[in-house]
Amino acid sequence: MAAYFHGRQFDTFEFHALEKGEYEACRFTNGSGHKADLSEFKFIDCEFVVCDLSLAKLNRTAFREVQFRECKLSGLHFESCHDFGLAFGFELCRIDFCTFIGMKLKGTRFVRSQLLESDFTDCDLTGALFDQTDLSRVVFDNTILEKADFRTAYGYQIDPEQNRMRQAKFSASGLAGLLGKYGLEIE
């Protein structure tokens, strides 16, 4: 039987040392997990603060109502996660070189974060919020961006012909990110 932890606080620790199991309403602070294997772990209603999970393995990992704050999450394959009940949000995080291919991420919040060269191909980001988030070299291809909010995001290049974007929100200063492929000079 897998271990079960509820309402626990984990401070200044190594993710490698965590017991495989289900963690509910737990808080993880100052955790180091570079290349950790979190496959088949379950995190439900948990919070990760100032953690480094770069290059961690996420095969069938469950993230249900999870919040990441000030975390480094580089090189992760989020599409390997268990998709049942998947829901997470990010604030002040570095989410560089990550893949979210084919995921349903409706309403996901990316706040004051950096997503350099991440890939959202075939994702459903309906109603997602990209608030003050750097989207430089992020791939949006065949992505559902309906009602997504990009008004304060920057660095993005999105082809409206390759993505579903009905009622997506953009600021006037972000129009260059939508028209880049046309070689227009926007002032």
Image (cartoon, grey):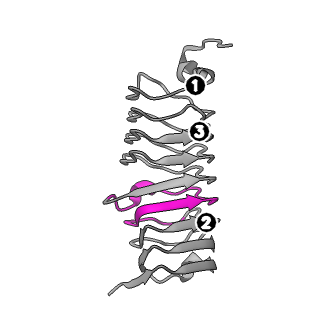
The amino acid on which the numbered mark 3 sits, given as a three-letter code, is Leu
Q: Disc count in the image?
A: 3
Which residue is under mark 2?
A: 49
- The crowd level at tag 1 (other Cα within 10 Å; few <14, some 14-19, many 20+) is few
Q: Tell me: residue 95, above or below residue 168.
A: below
Q: Which residues are magenta?
A: 56-83
Residue 135's disc is: 3
- The crowd level at tag 2 (other Cα within 10 Å; few <14, some 14-19, many 20+) is many
Residue shown at 46% from the left, 73% from the top: 25
Position of 134 with respect to 60 (left or right) is: right
Report, in whole angstroms, how far the alpha carbon at label 1 lies from the one at label 3: 15 Å
Q: Determine contact: label 3, label 2, CB under 8 Å.
A: no
Residue shown at 64% from the left, 53% from the top: 92
Q: Determine contact: label 1, label 3, CB under 8 Å.
A: no
In the rendered image, residue 114, in percent from the top left (x then y), is placed at: 62, 46
Residue shown at 59% from the left, 53% from the top: 91
SS assignment at label 3: loop
**Sequence order check, earlier mark of 2 and 1:** 2
Q: Quadrant of residue 176?
A: top right
Report, in whole angstroms, how far the alpha carbon at label 3 lies from the one at label 2: 22 Å
Q: Give the main secondary structure of the magenta stretch.
A: loop
Residue 171's disc is: 1
Position of 22 with respect to 69 (left or right) is: left
**Sequence order check, earlier mark of 3 and 2:** 2
In the rendered image, residue 63, in percent from the top left (x then y), is placed at: 42, 63
* Residue 32 in view of the camera: no
